[in-house]
Amino acid sequence: MPFDLQAFRAAQLAPRQAVVPVPDLAHWFDGDPVWTVRGLTGEEIARANDVTNRVRIYAATVDALASAARSEQADALKAMMGVTDIPEDLAKRIDHLTFGSVEPAISREDAVRLFRDYPIVAYQLTNKILELTGAGPDAGKAPRSTPAPM
């Protein structure tokens, strides 16, 4: 059976979502400790995969700013931006978590902190994000009305 290109073009597609229990983070939830994540788009995956180039650009920017700042300030800025000597897989997962978090929607700085303080929870969330991404979008669902955080 050939691919139905017309149906594909007409389909309403939305990223798959899942609610992930995060009992280790219960202290910071008012109610059930759950985190809603979604699958990533092709552009988000590409941005996460381009982490090496982006970190190099960030590092050069931070170094230029650091020349006018104290060492502690420069180190804090590097840590906040994720410009440290971290494994590439972790840097990608930080982006995956930032892009794929629906509720709560988090910043890159939040994702860095979650990976630092609760690495198992962060890996569980990013594993679910990658699983949803691999499954593809939900056909027939309307896309989100607001864009995902970038």
Image (cartoon, grey):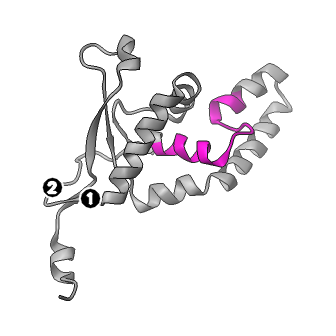
3 or 54: nearer the eye?
Answer: 3
| Residue 116 against residue 137 in the figure, above or below | above
What residue lies at 75% left-to-right and 39% top-to-bottom? 85
Please report the residue visible at 17 percent of the width from the left and 88 percent of the height from the top.
Answer: 1
Magenta span: predominant SS is helix
In this view, 64 is above or below 70: below
Q: Which mark is residue 52?
A: none
Disc 2 is placed on an element classified as loop
| Residue 142 colored in magenta in the image | no
Amino acid type, callout 2: Lys
- Amino acid at pointer 1: Pro
| Residue found 81% across the figure and 31% down from its top | 66
The quarter of the image holding the C terminus is top left
Is 87 magenta? The answer is: yes
Q: Are marks 1 and 2 in contact (CB under 8 Å)?
A: yes
- Residue under pointer 2: 141
**In this image, 143 relative to 90: left or right?**
left
Which quarter of the figure has residue 126? top left
| Residue 8 position in % (x across, y down) | 20, 75
**In this picture, residue 91 sits left or right of residue 106:** right
Q: Which residue is mark 1?
A: 137
Q: Nearer the viewer, residue 99 or 87?
A: 87
Q: Which residues are magenta?
A: 77-96
Assign a secondary structure to mark 1.
Answer: loop
